[in-house]
Amino acid sequence: MLETAIRYLTIGLGSALGGMARYWCSGAMARVFGETFPWGTFTVNAAGCAFIGLFAGVTVPEGRYYLPLLARQFVMVGLCGGFTTFSAFSLETLRLAGDGEYFKAAANIAASIAVCLAGVWLGYGLGSNWSER
């Protein structure tokens, strides 16, 4: 029971930190690029995908940098889960389409899927390669 409570608190702390980082990053992107395209959400999703891939590749149980399950859950479920924003991506895309911005909505979908999958692939490949050395 205590172990389960510690696990939930640890993941919750990671989620809170990830959410704060997402809020800061999204705001910074909006200040730099404006809000006509959801650059903040796009950036946090791309960065979060690349990071989770890298982290997973580096800390695989058979790799050089093994971390206990709780530490991996803190980072991958907590931090990355709180940082990335698929629900916000979906809502922003729906709003773009609702405003008649069909090209921007389609661009957001295509770019987010391509860049985020590429980020996970690249991050995992780099992390696995790094872990094998």
Image: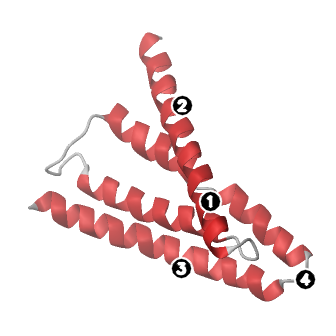
Q: Is residue 104 above or below residue 67?
A: below
Q: Are marks 4 and 2 in contact (CB under 8 Å)?
A: no
Identify the residue position indicated by label 1 in the image.
Answer: 26
Q: Is residue 45 above or below residue 21?
A: below
State the image quarter where residue 103 is shown: bottom right
Quadrant of the rendered image containing residue 93: bottom right
Mark 1 or 2: the one toward you: 1
Q: For the residue labelled by badge 1, is the local secondary structure a helix, a strand or a loop?
A: helix
Q: Which residue is mark 3?
A: 114
Q: Position of residue 28 (x, y in %)?
A: 59, 61
Name the residue tied to disc 4: 100
Give how far across and how far down residue 66 sits, in percent.
20, 43
Helix, strand or loop under label 3: helix
Q: Earlier in the sequence, mark 4 or mark 2?
A: 2
Q: In the picture, residue 71 is in which quadrant?
A: top left
- Give the CA distance from mark 4 to mark 3: 23 Å
**Which amino acid is tagged 3?**
Ala
Q: Mark 1 is on which residue type?
A: Ser
Tell me what residue is drawn at x 58 percent, y 44 percent.
Answer: 19
Q: Which residue is mark 2?
A: 12
* Residue that lies at the very extreme toward the bottom in this rendered image: 103
Q: Residues within 10 Å of mark 3 (few under 14, many from 20)?
A: few
